[in-house]
Amino acid sequence: AFTRDEDFLECPACGFLRPRWEVCAKEAQASLDAHYGSFAPSKPILNCTGSELRGGGSPQMTGLLKTHCPGVLASGRALDIGAGTGDWVSCLSHLGMRASGIEAFSRSAAIAREFGIDVRHGRFDASTMAREFGSEKFDLISSVGSFCYLDPKQAISLVRERLAPGGFVYIKSPVAESPHYWRGAKIADRIGKWTVCFYTSKTLIDFLKRENFKIIAVRYTPMFAPQVVSAWGISRWIAWPLQVLFRHVFPPDRVAILASAKTEI
């Protein structure tokens, strides 16, 4: 169950939440540029020094990969979709991968490159991928917080096309059942007007299964006290005692999914 947002319509067939407004690639790019153009992006969080709250590569995020695909981390080729200033690309590189990213906001991609992180500018589509990477395939394709900005069918089709045999998909996404929205906080206010599709944990997992991906591991991230203060407008002194409930009782704020493409017979 999740709190309804009147700005989003739930598909009765798949359960996806789509905005009432239509978002084409050109309009989404304009909205993205306007949002991020109002302030200068920060420098990247290098290596694996991030946290669940601050962003970047956290021990929890890397732990999922170390447990289930250590061989890929040692020397594999990685692509991060919606890489921003390259936090996750930097982390994957630090772990031993040959990692690159693709980012639609040009200034973020430029900042990443200033720090020696390979983030190319462009949207995740067939023409941009051909221009930037030729026919290259990847052992790991990740989307950390960006999958809701992509058309799911088009994106997963391109992911499958670009995955090397035995490759993995890693998706970390905010989810609609999060307590963040319980007191009326808007989805678009949190994740942007250029959102194309939004998910619950279940609908995102079910979608990957329907697209012939095998779910290898799922990890849920709770809502943190500072987020509660922002979303609910309550005192931090009340939010901290609630943290036990957010960790062990309430629905997650985000989900991380590791999957692999099933071999077609």
Image (cartoon, rainbow, N blue to C red):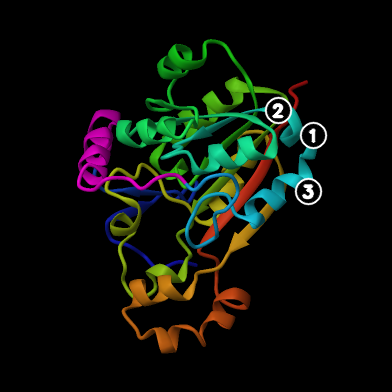
Q: Marks 2 and 3: CB-CB under 8 Å?
A: no
Q: Secondary structure under badge 1?
A: helix
Q: Marks 1 and 2: CB-CB under 8 Å?
A: yes
Residue identified by numbered label 2: 76
Q: Quadrant of the C terminus?
A: top right
Q: Is residue 221 left or right of residue 53?
A: right
Q: Residue 17: percent from the left, percent from the top?
A: 40, 51
Say which label, 2 or 3, has the lower sequence index.
3
Q: Secondary structure under badge 2?
A: loop
Residue type at numbered disc 1: Gly
Against 37, residue 29 (above or below) is: above
Q: Residue 243: percent from the left, percent from the top?
A: 54, 80
Residue identified by numbered label 3: 67
**Residue 71, numbered circle:** 1
At horizontal 31% and vertical 34% (from top left) the residue drawn is 107
Q: Residue 159: percent from the left, percent from the top?
A: 56, 27
Q: Which residues are magenta?
A: 22-44
Residue type at numbered disc 3: Thr
At horizontal 60% and vertical 78% (from top left) the residue drawn is 249
